Image (spheres, rainbow, N blue to C red):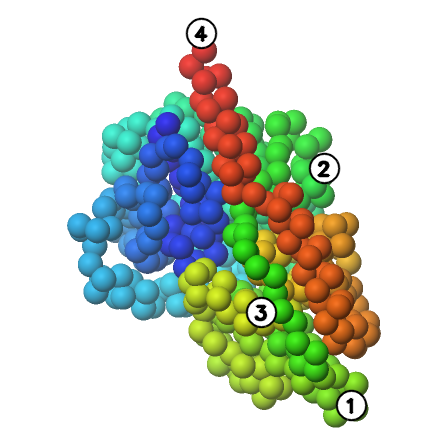
Amino acid sequence: MKILIISLELWADYSNGGNVFSNIFSGVNATFAQVYCSQGIPHNSLCYQYLQGTDKSFVKSSLLHKTPWRSFYPASEMSLERSNCESKDGLKSFFSKFKTPFFYFSRDVSRCCSSWKNKDLIDFVKQFSPDLIFAPNYSSPFMLKLDRFCQKVAGVPMVSYISDDNYSLKQLDFSLFFWIHRFWIRKEIRKTMARCSLLYTMTDEQKNELQPIFHLPIKILRKSALMISEPHKFVFGRLSMIYAGGLYNGRWRTLLHLAKTVVQMKSDGLAAECTIDIFTSCSNKKIVSKLVKCGCRVHAAVDSERLFDEYRKHDIALHVESFSKRMALRNRLSFSTKITDCLSSGCAVLAICPDSNAGLKFLARNQAAICVTNKKSLCHAIVSLSNPNVLESYSENALSLIGNDFKEEDNRLRLQADLLSIMNAKNRP
């Protein structure tokens, strides 16, 4: 089976999106190629053929009518020096700094106006000759157009994967560009979903919401989890917390509130010795400085193997989301891939999220985490977690859930069976 993956992010094990690809496709009997639209050199053990477009190449293509694409095999044609140069690309940094509705909208316009429907793209797809296309659903009209074009060229079934609320109008934003972009996204999603044979999502809430809209098969697909061989040892009189992930979308504010609460409880004599370690790729010095001033220890992001070791050194794994109304609506259907890591860490899990968040609902339904849905109850949660018996109980619940619902072998067999069924259905007379 040959699978063409079309994605916004590069396939690198150290990045969130790339780690998900490696996780869900590990062990699947298939050959992979990828078309992706971001900076950087892929780093994984499953895929070796790539076609890349970047912000810079799309802008150049719009102005000079040149191809935005370049194909390569990472090991032979792209050096580490070139990768480092790309990571410092000014245009990428510009977009990253100004994550506003206007720039997301203008980026899609720029890409759509480029000469992207060209021989380079067509030849890459035809030469790989996929049996199936796997195209995650992004809130990007350009990516949705790219999905459909590649499917038309290949003439094969397409499977999609959605993890955020990219479609509904249950959003809060006062930018005109946000709503222009949103309606454009909705139009392109409807066109793309009409061409899909199967849609994966991470939450029952999103599945139930989209099923009557798109009328296609929708199934749950989440990251598989590592299984630990020995129980975690909790020590009375100290609490060590760990958060690993991005600080965007207001998550840093929730972590900051947690840190301030811990400091206040210490001064009031209500909390045991408590530390908070944060592993993140966030480069915003102001945000990092605020967290450090409140006692957090902020570290650079690490790969999955090193992170697993770090989890084992801590008592509580944190899952947080923003409590702002805007971000709560944006993330209400999301299931953070970090939830799987937290559950499999051996730690007790503390989830601090709005009660509308689908990930938190999943944890609460399965009693797999202490769930804090308002900031006022955070103090009580921390006091209860000071008891090693409580920590041990939640750790056991988390590991039990992982053992039942997140087994790598089960996920791999289900995914491979789905993809083979879709591929074979297309080939039947």
* Residue beneath disc 3: 243
Badge 2 or badge 4: first in the primary sequence? 2
Q: Is residue 137 above or below residue 383?
A: above
* Residue beneath disc 2: 208
Q: Residue at x 50, y 69 (%)?
A: 310
Q: Residue at x 44, y 7 (%)?
A: 429
Q: Secondary structure at mark 2?
A: helix
Q: Residue at x 61, y 61 (%)?
A: 231
Mark 1 in CB contact with mark 3 (< 8 angstroms): no
Mark-to-mark CA distance, 2 and 1: 46 Å
Badge 2 or badge 1: first in the primary sequence? 2
Mark-to-mark CA distance, 3 and 2: 30 Å
| Nearest-to-viewer mark from 2 and 1 | 1
Badge 1 or badge 3: first in the primary sequence? 3
Q: Which mark is residue 429?
A: 4
Q: Amino acid at mark 2?
A: Asn
Q: Residue furthest left?
A: 76
Mark-to-mark CA distance, 1 and 3: 24 Å
- Horizontal relation, residue 137 to residue 361: left or right: left
Q: Amino acid at mark 3?
A: Tyr
The location of residue 374, given as percent across then percent down, is 79, 68
Q: Residue furthest bottom?
A: 267
**Is residue 161 something one can see in this rendering?**
no
